[in-house]
Amino acid sequence: MAICITFGTHEFTSMLEGYENVRAFCYNCQHWNGHCLTRWPWFTVCFIPVIPLAMHKYKEVTCYTCRFTQDLRYVHPPSSLAQTKA
């Protein structure tokens, strides 16, 4: 009898609470297409998250055009963040 056990990592991402309608300037591609996201990596066994690989969620600005990612602490508001109308 053979049992196959798979393991790996998975990153859970979601929009940063309170920043859903905020766009950020991307310094890589020079577009206003950055969105504020949270990212939390986990170790998985059989596709089930078991152990978090970080003590807290990462807060980042990710550009949807070029996929450039920057930590939210290094984005200087208000010049690089703009409120969009929903």
Image (spheres, grey):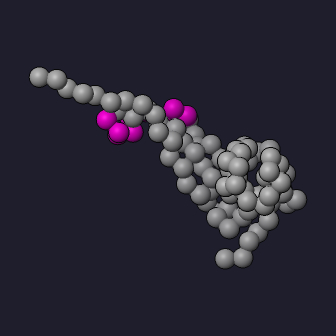
41 or 55, nearer to the observer: 41
Could you say where residue 9 lies in the image, as x and y percent from the top left?
Answer: 46, 34
24 or 54, nearer to the observer: 24
Q: Residue furthest right?
A: 79
Could you say where residue 18 lies in the image, as x and y percent from the top left?
Answer: 65, 63
Kindly identify the residue that appears in the image at 39 percent across and 34 percent down: 44
Could you say where residue 69 lies in the image, as x and y percent from the top left?
Answer: 70, 44
With respect to residue 14, does 48 lie above or below?
Answer: above
Residues shaded magenta: 46-54
Tally of numbered tags: 0
Task: Using residue 81 as the reference point, say whether residue 55 is left or right of it.
Answer: left
Residue 55 makes an appearance in the image: yes
- Specify whether residue 53 is painted magenta: yes
With respect to residue 86, does 25 lie above or below?
Answer: above
* Quadrant of the rendering where the N terminus is positioned: top left
Kindly identify the residue that appears in the image at 55 percent across and 54 percent down: 14
Could you say where residue 70 lies in the image, as x and y percent from the top left?
Answer: 73, 44
